[in-house]
Structures are given as C-alpha cells and as structure tokens.
Image: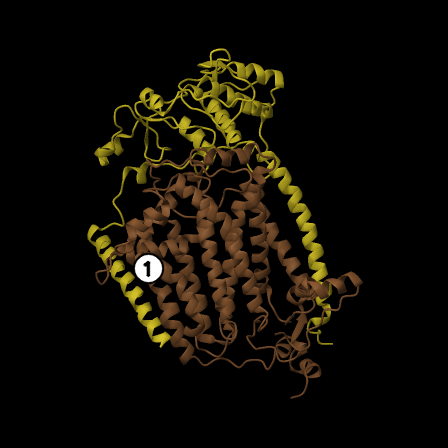
Amino acid sequence: MIRIIGILAGLFFTLGVLLAFFQGTSEVITNGEFKPTTAEMVYHKHPKEVEFSFDGPFGKYDRAQLQRGFQVYKEVCSACHSLKFVAFRDLQQLGYTEAQVKVLAAGFQVPGVDPNTGEATMRPGLPTDHFPSPYPNEIAARAANNNAVPPDLSLMTKARHEGSAYVYSLLTGFTEQPAALVKRFPEAKTPNGLHYNPYFANLNLAMAPPLGADGQVTYGEGNPEPTIDQMAQDVAAFLTWTAEPKLEKRRQTGWAVLGFLLFATMLAYMAKQQVWADKKKKKAA
Amino acid sequence: MSFPWAKEYTPQHPLMRYLDEKLPVPRLVYNAVGGGYPVPRNLSYMWNFGVLAGFCLVLQIVTGVILAMHYSADSTIAFAKTEHIMRDVNWGWLLRYAHANGASFFFVVVYLHIFRGFFYSSYKAPREMIWLLGVVIFLLMMATAFMGYVLPWGQMSFWGAKVITGLFSAIPLVGEPLQIWLLGGYAPDDAALNRFFSLHFLLPFVIAAVVILHIWALHIPGSSNPTGVEVKSESDTVPFHPYYTAKDGYGLGVALLIYFAFVFFLPNYLGHPDNYIEANPLSTPAHIVPEWYFWPFYAILRSFTADFLSIPAKLMGVLAMFAAILVWFFLPWLDKSPVRSGHYRPLFRKFFWFGLIPTMAVLFYCGGAPAEQPYVMIAQLATAYYFLHFLVILPIISSIERPEPLPYSITEAVLGKDEAAQLEPAE
C-alpha cells in the first residue's frame, strides 16, 4: 500500500516538474536563446590579475604599502566613504607608533558632547574612536551624491568576489563607454551623472573616477611613484587590511594548528594500525 | 539489548564501585562507546561519520555558546556586533570562522553519513527507528543552520530569511497570516531576528537530545556493516574500544586537518560575499542563494515553474522541497529488498552511482546558479529523476532484482572461508 501511494506521489511530482520543463524548453526554443543577451553579459569584466604581498597561504601585509593606502584613503576616499568598523587605535598595526596614532586621530573631527552645556558638538578624534562618517546621516549622503550612498569601505574587499583585485580594477577601470556597446544595446547607454566601468556589476556607477592623475597624493621619501596604478594597488591593500585585520595572525596560527594535527594524526594512524594488527586477514605464507 | 558476549563493566576502584551502585554513568559510557559495545569488525571508513557528526555538534555548541556571549540580536547593531567579534574580541575571529565553517563541515559529514545509509540500506529493519530519528536530526539541523545564517544580519541573511519564510505564504488560505505571524511583521526585522536567535540557541540542544535517542536506538540491534549480513558470532565483532576509538581517532585527525585548512586559510570560501554587506530591505541582491548545503533542495524548490493540476507553481515547489526530504522517512518501507548492502545488489548499485549521485551533483550545481536557463531546465530533469529514484525506481528494483550471493558471515567476508572456519562455532 505504502509503495503504491509512493509511486503515485512520485509520479505527481515528476509530471509536475516535467510539465514545467516542457514549458521552459518551448520558451527557450521560441526565443532561440537561453535568455536575452544584455550589455552586462557581454561587457562586464572579471577583476584584473594583480599581485599583492598578502597573496597565498604565506603572504603578509606590506606595512609601507598599507600606510600609503591609508594615506590615499585619508586624502581621497574619506571625502565620501566611511570606514566605520576601523578604530584609530587599529592603525598601530600599520606600524604607526602610539604617539603618531594620537596625532592622526586628532586630525579627524568626531561627534561629541560639550562637557559643560551637554550640547552636541564636534571634537578632535581619540585613538579609541572609530573613523567618523563624512556625512551625518544617509539622507545627507544621498543629497550630496546624486542620490547614491557611498558605501562604507571597512569590509569592501570581503563583500565582493576577489575583493582586493576588484577594488584595484574598479579604481583603474574607468573608460569611455565602447561605441559598439551603445550601438548594440542603445538602452544601456551610460545615463547622465553615471560613469562607465566594465568592472562594476551593471557597468555604470555613480562614483566619478576618484584617482584622476598620477601624483594626486604625495608619498613620502623612499616610496614608489604615486601613479594611478600604484595608488589603486595601495588603497586596495589597505582596504584588504581593514576587512581582514587578523589575516597574518590567522595564517600563523593556522600553520601551527595544521602542523600539530598532522603529527597527532600520524600518531593516531600508527595507534590504529597497532590496535587492529591482530584482526587483519593474515597474508598468505 | 546487546550481544551475549559483550564484555561487562567491572569497576576496580572502590570509588567506581560506589558510583556504579548509585549512578552507573561509567557503565553507561562503557556499554555505549567502550569495551562493552561489540561492533562488526568489517566497518569501512564510511562508518566514521557518525562519531564525526557528534564531534561537530559539540564543536558548534561550544563555539556558539561563546559567540552568543558577545553578540546582540538587535537588528540595528547585529551586523556591527559580528564585526566586533571579528575585530575586538580576543580570538573572536577564530570562534566565528570556526562556527561558520563548522556548520559547513557538519553538513559535509552528515551528508556522507546519510549517503552511506542510502548505499548500505542502513534504514532497513531492524534499524528503521535509527533512520527515522536521523531524518529528524537532519531537519532540525537545516532549521538551525538557516536561522544561524540570519544572525550576522548581512544582505544574504536578510534576503534568505525573506525568501524562506516567504515559502509559508504559498500555503492556501492561512499562508500570508502565517508568514506574518512567524516573522512577527511583514518583513524580517527585530522581532524575527530575536526569535531566530532564541531558536538558534535552543535547537542544538534539541538535536543533542534526538542524537541520544539515535544512539540509544542504534545500540538495540547494533551497528550495521558493509556486507549487510547480521552479526552471527563473537568472531564477527570487536569491542568498540579500543578498535573503533582508535579508528575514529585517526578519522577525526584527517577530518580536522581538512576543516582547519578551511578555517585558517579559506575562511570565507564557503560563504557569500554579499553577507559582508549590512542587511538593507530596500536593496535586493542580484542573486539570492542560500548556503551551499541547501543548494540541492533550493534547486528542487525553483524547478516548479508551472502550475500543475491547478496547484500554483510556488506551492508545488514548496511541497516538492519538503517532500524531497520527507520521502526519506518512508525508505524503510519503499525498499523491500531483503539484501541491505549495495555491494550485493547489481541493479540498485547502478542506479545509485549513475542515477542518484549525479542527480544530487546536478541539483547542487543548479541550486547555486542563478535562476535562469539553462540551469532551470537541467535542474528540472534532475528533480524529475530525484522523485522517480526514491518513489518509483527503488520500489521496483527491490522486487525485480536478483542479488549476488552474500558471504556466510562477517568473519568470512574479512578473513576468507578457511580462516573463518577456525574461528566460528560449527552450526
């Protein structure tokens, strides 16, 4: 009885899904394609190949590069983008001293309370403060940016596939929209106020190219030339650190754990062989 | 409940003798996973996954309870609290990565455990109850994992919660009010997040309770084995300790090596980048996908794109997704072949390796892919086969198949006829 009901139930679902299959297939046949081709499908690009010091299981951050990237963030990105999960004190991990961090923090104005009147005011940042948002709230951010909110950058490199290469590619990827694209997909023409970038998911983003010219940021002595490419790499490295500040400790711990486990597993294997020795089939003499 | 030759617990120390009289916990442990539990001597490494699953449950409870100490289920700060754990809590990043990857690892282990059960028909009498409890555990795990994924309150958390609770709205008449009641609102927000957190904390302990029943039920007939031939005499078994504690110890070492390789070197590989974007009810992600362990069932859900017998497509999908798991409950009665092990069932074996396994792989792939052609049509064929396999093919082959000859006993299967004859009692 249960098997008859089972077979009926099985046929019910099978026929239901096969009906959907034939409907879907006939649509595909009538349209002559699996799905309509869009400008994104043809023109969207995967992030560029780029090498970072932190690639691979042994990779480490390059402190000098992180400091340069921080400088790019501070002088360029921070005008619009917040970094709300990072505290100034964290900057010591980039190789700054405690005193330097204090000075850096004081360079930012953060919301505070006047100790005498209790009124809202602005005060210089302390190492314990997080990076302040450039806008008081989302409405202000929208109003200042053509209705597009600049996203927080703390986790950006983890919030995109191949995030570090993505940030680098996006910053260096602004170009003229190809004429062939507009010819083939007239409705995908970059609207006014948006900017064409093949590394962006839908090809057009509100952000204007933030790194406009070589030397936009002045690096200290002993550093490479601040070309657009170099600045983009540096800030991508910095944002990798903001997203994953524990990367080095994680890998270091990981090697110790794997090493220990490898040893323990070998011992466990030998113990298992010894325990089982008398239960195995004897080899033919 | 055990075999007559099972060793008896004999406490040596006076304290242990006292304890044995008053509260015989050591005896319980000895009979459950010690020298007092005789286990078939021929178990392959596929039998390691029960112990591993138990380990995963403990790992998830321990890491989860500590994470809960640092988390807040308030939708305005849940995302920031998760980042607080990652950045400011000592070793918080390790706890969170261990817990998130621990869920994945738990599902890997449990899927292998379940598919071991499929191949060796571990669900057959006298072990039906173990199987039924196992399916209950799996359903509880799915609920727990789903609610846990909502807690970081990222984009996939929010939209996953919205899609999955939206399934209830497919139920006729009561669907919409039911969904609102379950969520505590029209969309997932504070009310939903708080109850998900509460249930996510509770359900693992419910799982632990059902696991105890699962193991209890196991100890009545004893473990199954790769030949599917029941234990006949003492030479067919070995005591769990030291034989299987040693083997499980080795298995655990190998499993942990793989697990920690993910935790320390690819901690976000199995997650979705969108979940590092804070939940935003006004911005729908391009592709909403659940965690990888739900992909096969998500593919089944999305395969029903047409109304059938005046049942709306959405309801068909929901029914099919639940039926896809509920059908496992009926396996003990759908598969009537007296032979358990797939090794001795030529036809069953072919459908397992060339039917069920590729179907699951295809459903897995399509469930993670966007809901577009050609993935949908491929998933539809796989879904059709999935239901045919369990509900039509399995009952039919179990009555027409001619099984291959079984070994006389487990001892014979391991040692061969000659050596076995010296060990086994004459009939």
Q: Is residue B21 above or below residue A53?
A: below
Residue at figure coordinates x 52%, y 72% from the top left: B127
Q: Is residue A269 above or below residue B104?
A: below
> Is disc 1 surrounded by few (<14), some (14 to 19) or many (20+) residues within 10 Å?
some
Residue at the extreme top:
A116
Give x and y (percent) for residue B284: 33, 39
Chain B as rendered: colour: brown
Q: Is residue A220 visible?
A: no
Q: Amino acid at mark 1?
A: Leu
Q: Count all numbered tags in the image, as a single digit.
A: 1
Give x and y (percent) for residue A195: 32, 26
Chain A as rendered: colour: yellow
Callout 1: chain: B
Q: Going by the image, does A207 lie left or right of B32?
A: left
Between B366 and A140, the one nearer to me in the picture = A140
Q: Quadrant of the N terminus of chain A?
A: bottom left
Judging from the image, what secondary structure is the residue with disc 1 in?
Answer: helix
Image quadrant where residue B272 sits: top left
Image quadrant where residue B328 sits: bottom left
Q: Which residue is mark 1?
A: B319
Residue at figure coordinates x 38%, y 39% from the top left: B189
Give x and y (percent) for residue A244: 53, 33
Q: Quadrant of the C terminus of chain A?
A: bottom right
